Amino acid sequence: MRPTKSDDDALVDLVDAVLRTGAVVEADVVITVADVPLVGLKLRAALAGMKTMTEHGVFEEWDEAHRLGNSEASGERVE
Amino acid sequence: MTETAFDEGRYLYCVAPDGDESLSTTGLDDEPVRLVREAGLTAVVHDCGSLYDSDSATRIRRWILAHQSVVDDAGEAFGTPLPFQFDTVIRGDDDAVRSWLDAESERLTDHLDALAERWEYRVEVVWDEDAARDELEATDADLRALAERRNEADEGTRFLLTKRYETRLDRLLDEQRRAEAADLADRLGGEATELVDLGDRSRAGLDIGDADENVDVLARFAVLATDDEREAVGLLLDDVAADPGIEVRFTGPWPPYTFTPELDGGTDASDEV
């Protein structure tokens, strides 16, 4: 069996890998969306894995604030 | 909390061992990709003035594909790179990147050496849970005894026996899944440099394509492997997939995202990596 890079399953793995893993640097000089809940809010909300992350309590605080702001500002459907 | 506003920054795709190779490619939003070299290392970057954020799944998907494509190109040019997470930005100009590379050079080099010639693969094994359930119901003596008692019991007792039956069935099924996953992990791990059990961790997805999420996942792994090891893993997966109730998905090669360590500020003296 040879690995594939081109089908939909591969694409799902790729998105997961790029968003969830990869080197994370904690240095004053570096900003990353992973560890700073104040950035990439819209991006995170667009992710299907969002709900699970929230269930694990990782993003609870900012998530609550964000959903509130989001629904007030645009009247978007909040799941 | 980190201040997120900045005037000048460098979006960081990956760090690779330095070489004579050049890289001609474009990144997110067709930004020209450049190399910043220092201390035997190459950082693959583009100039940026803000973080990338959008609520459009299509846009994010385009960015992610662009991010991956740059890391792929860098891998082809320089060998296995240390891929960075999406939206990692170094605040400042090229000098800031150089001093960061310099400060982190020992650790970055160690990690690159450990990953050299190795790539990440993802393995997902899907099983027929209904068939496994049927088999347990047919073969487990305790379940059959419970079923017999249930059939002869009055209504109240029947309810309790049904509960006990379902609880036992669920437990047996879970035990079987775990045992088979552990066995797979052992066998795959024996062929690869390293294996990480991704377990039940749900994936960060973007509702992409036709990827079927409604399947019973027996196990999911990330595997770090050389080309030879990849061949061995592929052969082993052929065996696994020979079982008619089993479906195997094997993707890659990816840059070693899962096997890339977290790098802290570099000031922790107790760090033993």
Image: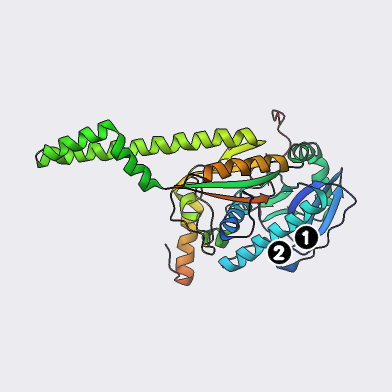
How many numbered marks does the figure carry?
Answer: 2
Image marks 2 and 1: residues in contact by CB distance under 8 Å: yes
Q: The residue under label 1 is which amino acid type? A: His
Residue located beneath label 2 in the image: B28
In the depicted view, which residue is nearer to us: A77 or B30? B30
Q: Residue furthest right?
A: B20
Residue at the spot 36% in from the left edge and 47% down from the top edge: B130
Have a look at marks 2 and 1 and say if they share a chain.
Answer: yes
- Residue A67, x across and y down, in percent: 47, 61
Q: The residue under label 2 is which amino acid type? A: Leu
* Chain on which label 1 sits: B
Query: Is B106 on the left-hand or right-hand side of A51?
Result: right
Residue at the spot 43% in from the left edge and 39% down from the top edge: B177
Going from the N terminus, do you reach mark 2 or mark 1 first? 2
* Residue B46: image tag: 1
Q: Is residue A9 above or below residue B182?
A: below
Q: Secondary structure at mark 1?
A: strand
